[in-house]
Amino acid sequence: MSASTKTDISRILRRLKECGLRLTRNRENLVEVLAQSKQPLSADELRQKAGFAATDLVTVYRNLEAFQSAGILQRIPLENGSQLFELTDLGDHYHHLICRECHKTERLEVCLGEQLSNKAKSLGYKQIAHVLEVYGICGECDAQAT
Ligand SMILES: [Zn+2]
Ligand SMILES: [Zn+2]
């Protein structure tokens, strides 16, 4: 484990405590798995990597919900209705480019959401948020197909 991963984990755990979440072994496990993963993970992948039994998927989801409300987790919706999860910093905002075939996920450093928020504001909405993900076939998968 790299030094930066370690600081990330302790900062994230501190944040969970500040939000009034108890630091159970389960929660620490999940945070560690998320912090060490290079790619966003599905709930079931998380469950397996964190060493939970198949029957514990509900527990995993419950913890992920708690993480999300603490602002340390971003949910990435997929086209088929399932979702991936990755750690995020409070206030961070990313869109992703996701390969349909291999599920490779990249962060896009652009946000075109301003127009949408302005429109929502003009309609009298407050606390506006948006989710926007981009799907396609990555170069590697495309090369394999031809
Ligand atoms: Zn791909
Ligand atoms: Zn955005």
Image (tube, rainbow, N blue to C red):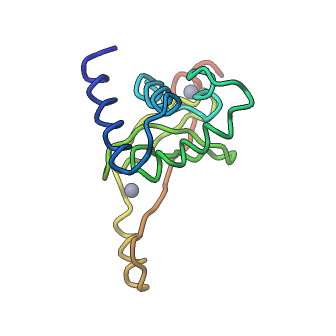
**Percent of width and height locating residue 65:** 54, 48
Q: Is residue 53 above or below residue 100?
A: above
Which residue is pictured at 66% across the width and 43% down the height? 82
Q: Quadrant of the N terminus?
A: top left
**Percent of width and height locating residue 23:** 43, 36
Residue 122 quadrant: bottom left
Nearer to me, 146 or 74: 74
Nearer to me, 91 or 64: 64
**Percent of width and height locating residue 123:** 43, 85
**Percent of width and height locating residue 54:** 73, 27
Q: Quadrant of the C terminus?
A: top right
Q: Which residue is most to the top?
A: 1
Nearer to me, 79 or 138: 79
Nearer to me, 62 or 123: 62
Image quadrant of ligand 2 equals bottom left
For residue 100, side relative to residue 85 (left or right):
right
For residue 65, side relative to residue 12 (left or right):
right
**Count of residue discs:** 0
Which residue is pictured at 56% across the width and 39% down the height? 84
Which residue is pictured at 31% across the width and 39% down the height? 14
